[in-house]
Amino acid sequence: MTGRHKAIRLPPLKTLRVHNPKRATENPCIAIMSSVLACWASAGYNATGCASIENQLRKCMDGPAPRLRPQTQSTTTWGACKST
């Protein structure tokens, strides 16, 4: 055996899907979750003072997922920019 392996050929892709890096999806519950973690860190895990923040986090997590706004297309007309 020479140690060389036969290359594996993958089937061609019909379409290549790439996530849009310009669209940042941010979860609104992250800020509340960081508040809960900070409260637990300062007052302890079963602190009664953190109950209201914990309830806010539960409501946020149980609620419907936020809908993303559709990205608007650029209105630049490239034909108008052409020099004569």
Image (cartoon, helix red, strand yellow):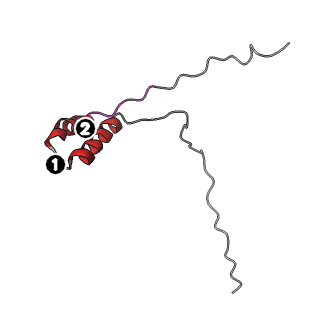
Q: Closer to the camera, 64 or 10?
A: 64
Residue occupying image coordinates x 16% and y 39%: 49
Which quadrant of the rendered structure holds the C terminus? top right
Q: Give above or below for 63 relative to 69.
A: below
Disc 1 target residue: 46
Q: Position of residue 59 (x, y in %)?
A: 22, 35
Q: Quadrant of residue 55?
A: top left
Q: Position of residue 28 (x, y in %)?
A: 35, 33
Q: Give above or below for 67 relative to 3.
A: above
Helix, strand or loop at label 2? It is helix
Instruction: Report the amino acid beneath label 2.
Output: Leu
Residue 57: mark in rendering: 2
Check residue 68 for magenta coloring. yes
Residue occupying image coordinates x 20% and y 49%: 44
Q: Closer to the camera, 47 or 65?
A: 47
- State left or right for residue 25 relative to residue 41: right
- State left or right for residue 6 relative to residue 27: right
Magenta part of the protein: which range? 62-70
> Tag 1: Cα neighbours inside 10 Å, few (<14), some, or many (≥20)?
few
C-alpha distance separating marks 1 and 2:
15 Å
